[in-house]
Image (cartoon, rainbow, N blue to C red):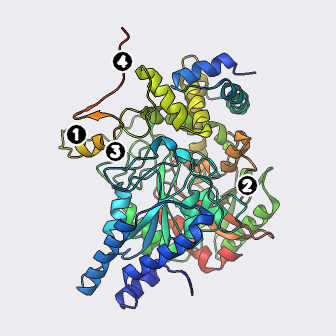
Amino acid sequence: MTISREDVLRVAELAHLELTPEEAELYRGQLDEILNYIGKLQQLDVTNVEPMTQMSSQTVAASGEPRPGAESDLREDTLLPCHIADAVLEQAPDAVKPFFRVPRVIER
Amino acid sequence: MSAGAPWTIASIQTSLRAKKISAREITTEFYADIDRRNPSLNAYLALSRDRAFAQADRVDVATACGEKLGPLAGVPIAVKDVINTAGVRTTCGSKILETYVPPYDATAVARLEKAGAIILGKTNCDEFAMGSSNENSAYGPVRNPAALDRVPGGSSGGSAAAVAAGLAVAALGTDTGGSIRQPGACCGIPAMMPTYGRVSRYGLIAFASSLDRIGPFARNIADATAVMSVIAGHDENDATSAAVSVPDYAAEIEPPVAGLRIGVPEEYFAQGIDEEVKDKVLAGIALLEKLGCRRVPLKMPHTEYAIATYYIIATAEASSNLARYDGVRYGLRVPGSTLIEMYRKTRERGFGAEVKRRLMLGTYALSSGYYDAYYLRAQKVRALIARDFSEAFEKVDAIVTPTTPTPAFKLGEKTSDPLQMYLADIYTVTGSLSGIPGISVPCGETRGQLPIGMQILGPRFSESRVLQLARAFEKAGGFTI
């Protein structure tokens, strides 16, 4: 067994999910099966393999292989006007313009 | 279309310019068909009638005034519900965005409309594009037009079904691990995943940012090519879109394919493949050989690690991207006495089972103590999978494989076994992880008349060649082989 019930509850807490006891048990079994399958990656020797961390065309060769040392394509950090603030706030469950209102953040 | 041959982009352009039909009449015809057939297919989640008819009228006024029409003038197109449409509800197939109406258009949608296309509505999909059968939609599954008791594939099942059923001339889908190509294969239509960065993702609601791509479904290669020509190209609003010029696809897909080297990797025909799928794809490859292509056997040894790699990377990225659904800024909010309680209750009620499963898997893979064993290792294996392709493309011009190991399965057949569902993407995730383009084209049917798909993959930014092979295959009768 790779993953315990406690692991599931801990991960659910990190992911801000509230699981029922039935869900926790269901997911434990399913995640266990998936993680066992994923365990096959441990068979491979990956020493001296650079992780593929960037996908943009500037940082990979035409074939798709990472191009070491290439820099990603960054734009100038300039401010641009944005005129959709009102439209965005219209979508909020609880807005007091120009703010989103949320429950108490700090205890006591 | 109620009678005669289905509309194509070319036939619409000819008829509009000859004033045989108006864009309003075409739009009316499509909505009549949708109203009649969508209740059984469930391909559309929302129809944007006001927006569609306003656009149709603009096209008709332009036609009447003798103005130059765009390349997609009057062409009815459907858009997957993970792509933002200003003023038109966009749910991602999720309860958490049930009421969300985006304030802006995705670049791909804006480009389609600028070219004259008519956006008919939003198509059903697996929740947040997570799934291979469309059964993870919070709004019910889509049914496969070729067999109503079967899935259309996923996650872009609604887009595939809409085009296959003639309820749109073309559609936009998104592909993260196979979500365009696999439903294209299941529904029997061409379906293209462009190179990573080829099509802007501005306005695409993110699932896994190093994998997500937008691409077209169409009924023929000319139509898929026409849509690609409109949506491809750099966009300053998407930092991951590539500043690589877009060739004239329509011109580049016509030359004969004789002399092209076609790689056939043995790993894609190994155990687990349906015999009828294997036979038809091999027949498709034989047809390409008849057209003068040279077949080159390949070994791609890291293929068997692709699903495991994909499900770590995609879920890890999803766990980060979907953290934004917390009840604060948009969508569902379930009240709580504290902020954290509100987050948890909102996400518990708003997300479906598969999304929760993937968020937990991704969170686990990124969590302290497991990062190196899972996420970092997956990124390294991803590099090995990409290397398999770069080495192959030194020897061949394109790679041809089955799109899926089996034809469309029955509704409910795999819902209780997530791992079996994941394995439906076994031949598509490799191209996703490597950033390369690919297309699924129909290559006949099983004896039970279920569509079969053949996948053509090429090096980065080789859309022209991929489409050229698909076009030659289509012209030679490959779709009904």
Name the mark on residue A15.
Answer: none
- Residue B418 x, y percent position in the rendering: 70, 40
Comes first in the chain, label 3 or label 2: 3
Name the mark on residue A105.
Answer: 4
Q: Nearer the viewer, residue B425 or A74?
A: B425
- Residue B352 x, y percent position in the rendering: 58, 39
Q: Nearer the viewer, residue A87 or B14?
A: A87
- Residue B304 x, y percent position in the rendering: 70, 42
| C-alpha separation, residue under disc 2 versus residue under disc 4 | 50 Å
Quadrant for the C terminus of chain B, please: bottom right
Residue at 65%, 16% in the rendered image: A6
Q: Nearer the viewer, residue B307 or B26?
A: B26
**In this rendering, would B386 be left or right of A31?**
left
Where B138 falls versus B479 (above or below)?
above
Report crowding for label 3: few under 14, some 14 to 19, many 20 or more residues within 10 A (C-alpha): some
Where B472 falls versus B295 (above or below)?
below
Which residue is labeled 1 in the image?
A: A76
Mark 3 lies on a secondary structure that is: loop
Mark 2 or 4, closer to the camera: 4
